Image (spheres, rainbow, N blue to C red):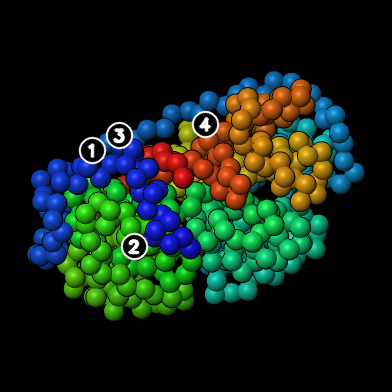
């Protein structure tokens, strides 16, 4: 976890975002002095987020694949990729888009002739959550089947339980959704990578955005794990840098089912806005808050709980609530391709990051001319930066096979890895809930780490 003195310089970088904290005093006509006066429902009158139309909703500019030349090197051992993504547990709602992203990536790679002359194989396994040992069992099974890379887990807490097992076996762990800052400095032998940006960025964007909406005091209900506390730490730093104050922060543990105590303590502090940093526990927490007079416009959510609640709540329960999800908005043509893979998809969270993970692993394998995990890892950074721009496997591998250096820019954004395997630049999407308790994109913010 990154200490606040280390994170402080990054706050300054985010002032360049269009949701800069200079809007704090003018967004709602309030003063810049933090105040906790007034009831929770009355405080909602001070929340009025800047109006913005969603960007990035059009079609993506996928380069034409054309005729893909054959690989100059072939392998006797096909590239085999495992996935460790949630089909059960508190993040199960993220499984379908992530798995669809992986499957779409595998399909396109194989449609273009595969990697090193052979089709890529994929094996899917459930990650479960931190209440179970499913991830360890699934990892053991995947390693036993000879995978070179494992895409997952979605949960930072789950990844912490298997990262040493995976990287210790000389296999790449590539998460499309881990956001804990802890992984930046993990002793992973250069084998841990991710397409989701660290919560240093999501936390700053969310904190700044609440400030632009006029929130001068903030309460937080936080999952007590690597994801929750890491994100909360960065939200708080951003709120305070904007001149605001976190007036209450209540923790709960994975597996808890009662949240009345946390809700009551946060509401007693009478915050202008409340950040819910949870997984699917939001299904229980939101009704407790709205039942006590909290307006949905006071509620700010995060990627761990941004989900379709149309079957969980009465219409209008979340209307006006907002939240953040790392990554750029899914483009229309990408959505169509994902729906062809899984017609039942309800949302697209981390589908782009999962798709990009497949492409980056495949391209690094081509450049390495090896399906050995330790060799592939040496080329992941190189295919993400510095060469000719390309954004799908067919166009990128064509360049590689013609002797060109490539810079893969994907569906999740520009990617560009640091030496630690983190994206050095990324988008954070901001979304708003509608009357039917589903969400739509509002705006996306670009930042560098």
Q: Which residue is mark 3?
A: 53
Q: Secondary structure at mark 1?
A: loop
The crowding category of the residue bearing disc 4, from other C-alpha atoms within 10 Å (few below 14, some 14 to 19, many at least 20), is: some
Q: Earlier in the sequence, mark 2 or mark 4?
A: 2
Q: Nearer the viewer, residue 281 or 146?
A: 146
On the question of residue 329 being in view, the answer is yes
Residue 70 left/right relative to 136: right
Q: Quadrant of residue 236?
A: bottom left
What's the distance in space between the residues labelled 2 and 4, CA to CA? 32 Å
Q: Which residue is mark 1?
A: 51
The correct choice, above or below, for 353 with respect to 191 in the image is: above
Q: Secondary structure at mark 2?
A: strand
What's the distance in space between the residues labelled 3 and 4, CA to CA? 20 Å
Q: Quadrant of residue 169?
A: bottom right
What's the distance in space between the residues labelled 3 and 2, CA to CA? 24 Å
The correct choice, above or below, for 60 with respect to 172 in the image is: above
Q: Which residue is mark 2?
A: 276
Q: Earlier in the sequence, mark 3 or mark 2?
A: 3
What's the distance in space between the residues labelled 1 and 4, CA to CA? 26 Å
Query: Answer yes or no: do the residues labelled 1 and 3 have beta carbons within 8 Å?
Result: yes
Q: Secondary structure at mark 4?
A: helix
Residue 244 screen position, x and y as percent: 22, 57
The crowding category of the residue bearing disc 2, from other C-alpha atoms within 10 Å (few below 14, some 14 to 19, many at least 20), is: many
Q: Nearer the viewer, residue 251 or 129?
A: 251
Q: Residue at x 39, y 60 (%)?
A: 4
Q: Earlier in the sequence, mark 1 or mark 4?
A: 1
Residue 327 screen position, x and y as percent: 47, 43
Q: Which residue is mark 4?
A: 333
On the question of residue 280 being in view, the answer is no
């Amino acid at each position: 976890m990154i200490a606040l003195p280390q994170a402080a310089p990054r706050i300054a970088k985010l002032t360049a975002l269009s949701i800069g904290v200079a809007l704090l005093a003018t967004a709602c006509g309030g003063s810049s002095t933090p105040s906790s006066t007034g009831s929770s429902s009355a405080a909602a009158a001070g929340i009025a987020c800047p109006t913005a139309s969603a960007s990035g909703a059009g079609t993506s500019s996928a380069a034409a694949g054309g005729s893909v030349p054959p690989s100059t090197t072939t392998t006797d051992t096909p590239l085999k990729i495992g996935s460790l993504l949630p089909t059960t547990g508190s993040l199960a709602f993220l499984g379908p888009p992530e798995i669809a992203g992986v499957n779409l990536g595998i399909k396109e790679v194989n449609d273009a002739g595969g990697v090193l002359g052979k089709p890529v194989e994929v094996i899917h396994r459930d990650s479960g959550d931190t209440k179970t040992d499913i991830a360890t069992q699934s990892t053991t099974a995947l390693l036993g089947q000879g995978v070179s890379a494992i895409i997952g887990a979605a949960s930072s807490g789950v990844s912490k339980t298997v990262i040493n097992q995976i990287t210790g076996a000389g296999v790449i762990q590539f998460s499309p959704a881990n956001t804990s800052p802890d992984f930046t400095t993990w002793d992973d032998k250069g084998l841990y990578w991710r397409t989701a940006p660290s919560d240093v960025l999501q936390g700053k964007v969310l904190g700044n955005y609440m400030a632009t909406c006029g929130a001068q005091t903030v309460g937080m209900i936080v999952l007590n794990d690597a994801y929750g506390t890491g994100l909360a730490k960065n939200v708080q730093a951003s709120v305070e840098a904007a001149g605001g104050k976190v007036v209450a922060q209540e923790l709960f543990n994975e597996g808890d089912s009662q949240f009345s105590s946390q809700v009551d303590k946060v509401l007693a502090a009478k915050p202008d806005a409340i950040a819910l940093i949870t997984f699917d526990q939001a299904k229980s927490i939101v009704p407790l808050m709205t039942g006590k007079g909290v307006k949905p416009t006071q509620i700010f959510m995060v990627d761990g709980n941004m989900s379709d609640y149309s079957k969980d709540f009465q219409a209008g329960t979340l209307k006006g609530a907002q939240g953040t999800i790392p990554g750029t908005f899914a483009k229309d043509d990408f959505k169509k391709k994902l729906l062809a893979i899984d017609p039942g998809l309800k949302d697209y969270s981390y589908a782009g990051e999962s798709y990009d993970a497949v492409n980056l692993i495949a391209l690094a394998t081509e450049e390495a001319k090896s399906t050995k995990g330790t060799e592939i890892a040496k080329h992941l950074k190189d295919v993400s930066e510095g060469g000719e721009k390309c954004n799908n496997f067919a166009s990128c591998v064509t360049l590689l096979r013609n002797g060109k250096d490539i810079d893969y820019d994907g569906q999740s954004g520009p990617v560009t890895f640091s030496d630690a395997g983190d994206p050095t630049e990324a988008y954070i999407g901001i979304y708003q809930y509608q009357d039917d308790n589903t969400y739509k994109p509002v705006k996306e913010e670009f930042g560098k780490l």
